[in-house]
Image: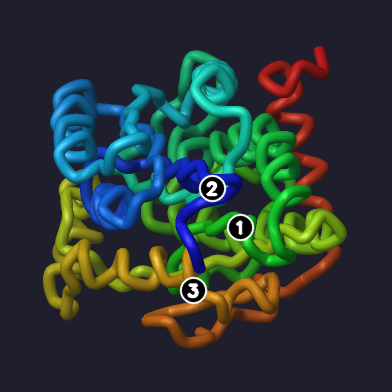
Amino acid sequence: MTTTTRHQPRVAVITGASSGVGLSAARTLASQGWRVIGTGRDPQRTATAAAQLQAVARPGAPGNMIRVDLALLADAARAAEQIRSLTDRIDVLINNAGGTARERVITSEGNEATFTGNHLGHFVLTRQLLPLLQRSAADAPRGATRIINVSSRAHETAPGLDWDNLQMIEHFVPIKAYCNAKLANLLFTRVLSEQLSRDGIVTHAMHPGIVDSNFINHADDGTKNYLATMPMVSSDEAADTVVWLATAPEPGATTNGYYYQRQPAFSTDAAKDAASALRLWRESEKLAAAALGHC
């Protein structure tokens, strides 16, 4: 696939691009001639990533980094506005940011941070950026415009979402909250693929593997000890599938896929439940109403 549209560089927006898989994918795409707009939460890491993007960016395809905390929905909406000020179209949106936590954290908006940072923040950002994706798709071959959601095989341990305690604000267990959020990523992918197929936009999810990055540093001790026993991959190895999903011709021919190492991966029945996917969408709209401008 070419890296230009109308003699302009293709544009990729990547969340969590200040470190790990997101930064690796951002550097690769920038080196291929893409204009990359990344987001990061930590000020120092975000500044360092910006310098790295500029170092590999090609002329006419500047790299930008935006600071945002996706666990705060108002901040996610602000980031979308800032992205819209930088570009009038998006060719690929990579929803990569996420992580687990040591304990329950309730944000100033009243949401639980693990659920919000992994799912709701991306729900708001994606919804707010859809017009830019649709604008790109209108001018591009079908399947060239894409949304990639980074999920995890951790979703396999989530039997389904508890609609009475969706964010696990009550009876919080760090790793269970993370697994629920990764299930939400797959359900979100399902609805997006159905809604956007008519526009020629494809949506896929992927499992990066257990990545040797700062992800593990934020986990509770039990999760750290468990992950330490597992084989790990580098950020560059995990990012290979992200970049492939964003650029290769094959993923553009289908939608609602779930991949690991460029191959279709197993997902649970809970992740394929159409009714749950639609209900999660509706519940997410309610939780994010203010950020989406519905209030």
Q: Which mark is residue 146?
A: 1
Question: Residue 291: where, in percent of width, then height?
Answer: 67, 20
Looking at the image, is mark 2 or mark 3 earlier in the sequence? 2
Q: Which mark is residue 248?
A: 3
State the CA–CA distance, disc 2 to disc 3.
15 Å
Question: Residue 266: where, in percent of width, then height?
Answer: 54, 85
State the CA–CA distance, disc 1 to disc 2.
6 Å
Question: Residue 87: where, in percent of width, then height?
Answer: 54, 28
> 188 or 3: which is nearer to us?
3
Q: Does residue 277 show up?
A: no
- Secondary structure under badge 2? strand
Where residue 51 sits, quadrant-wise, is top left
Q: Residues within 10 Å of mark 3 (few under 14, many from 20)?
A: some
At 53% from the left and 57% from the top, the residue drawn is 149
Q: Give the residue number, with chain letter if any, for mark 2.
A: 93
Q: Residues within 10 Å of mark 1 (few under 14, many from 20)?
A: many
Please state if 236 lies on the left or on the right of 140 as rendered.
left
Q: How many marks?
A: 3
Looking at the image, is mark 1 or mark 3 earlier in the sequence? 1
Answer yes or no: do the residues labelled 1 and 2 have beta carbons within 8 Å?
yes
Q: Residues within 10 Å of mark 2 (few under 14, many from 20)?
A: many
Please state if 258 lies on the left or on the right of 52 as rendered.
right
